[in-house]
Amino acid sequence: MKFFLDTANLEEIKKIKSIGMMNGVTTNPSLIAKENIFNKNEIDAHYISICKLLNNEENLSAEVISTEYEDIINEGIKLSLLSPKIVIKVPMTINGIKSIKFFSKKKIRTNCTLVFSLGQAILVAKSGADYVSPFLGRLDDLSFNGLQLIKEIKEIYDNFKFKTKILAASIRNPIHIIECAKIGIDAITTPINVIYSLFNHPMTNIGLDKFLKDYRKKIK
Ligand code: G3P
């Protein structure tokens, strides 16, 4: 199961990279807007800086901000030329799906984002996207069962042996990651705090504290 970090922050990427728990990065326009970046050239330079932190097996999903077909194609091609590590993140719209079909024929990798239903997930797979990003947390926020959606997407993709990888997005807590692992999907993308939460257990801290106290009482 691959772990992507859902961020555009270089320091966060370096931290998770250094503990070896990162297989790539996903960004979105809101995450980019949180960084100290103010124009298109700076955004491109920022994407290149992120790619430099990744090895050749890792990738960065960079999202288009265009909504018209021709514009998505032009923006996506430009993004793909920044680095071979870039996967073009495209929203789940008619123009988005048309663009994914185009990119797929050109062997440009894509991640279809803002997926909230099974119908959308089927369209994404049929378009030839490399990744589908169902938004777990945002569904839960509205009292829909995000994990149920992930489970059913997996069932349908398995039925047809679709090659599109399921990358659960909008992860809010460690339970989301654990349940996604039980369902057996390909990947999750998570904010840094949820990765840290996976490490925590009070019994680990209590146990370590006791081991060290016992040792230090006896051994100088
Ligand atoms: O990057 C897409 C997704 O992970 C966004 O998550 O927390 O804004 O719902 P969130």
Image (cartoon, rainbow, N blue to C red):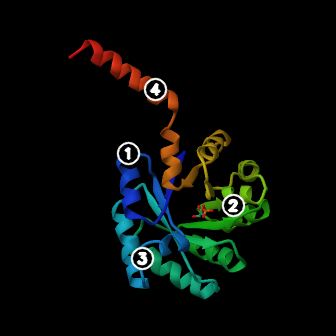
Question: Which of the two labelled residues, at mark 1 and mark 3, occupies the earlier sequence position?
Answer: 1
Label 4 sits on residue = 206
Q: Is residue 80 left or right of residue 177?
A: left
Q: Residue 190 lies in what quarter of the image?
A: bottom right
* Eye-nearest disc, 2 or 4: 4
Position of residue 63 measured from the top left corner of the image (x, y, whole percent): 54, 73
Image location (x, y in percent) of residue 112: 63, 67
Q: Marks 3 and 4: in contact by CB < 8 Å?
A: no
- Label 4 SS: helix
Amino acid type at image mark 1: Ile
Residue 44 in the image: above or below residue 190: below
Q: Earlier in the sequence, mark 4 or mark 3?
A: 3
Q: Which mark is residue 81?
A: 3
Q: The residue under label 2 is which amino acid type? A: Arg
Relative depth, front residue between 25 and 127: 25
Instruction: Quote the CA–CA distance across marks 4 and 1.
Output: 23 Å
Name which of mark 4 and mark 1 comes first in the sequence. Answer: 1
Q: Nearer the viewer, mark 3 or mark 2?
A: 2
Tell me the SS state at disc 3.
Answer: helix
Q: Residue furthest left?
A: 220
Q: Residues within 10 Å of mark 2 (few under 14, many from 20)?
A: some
Of the four image quadrants, the one with ligand 1 is bottom right
Of badges 2 and 1, nearer the viewer stands 2
The three-letter amino acid code for the residue at tag 4 is Ile
Q: Nearer the viewer, mark 1 or mark 3?
A: 1
For image coordinates 34% across by 22% down, the residue present is: 212
- Mark 4 vs mark 1, foreground winner is 4
Quadrant of image for the N terminus: top right
| Residue highlighted by disc 2 | 138
- Mark 2 Cβ inside 8 Å of ligand 1: yes
Given the image, on which type of amino acid does mark 3 rest? Leu
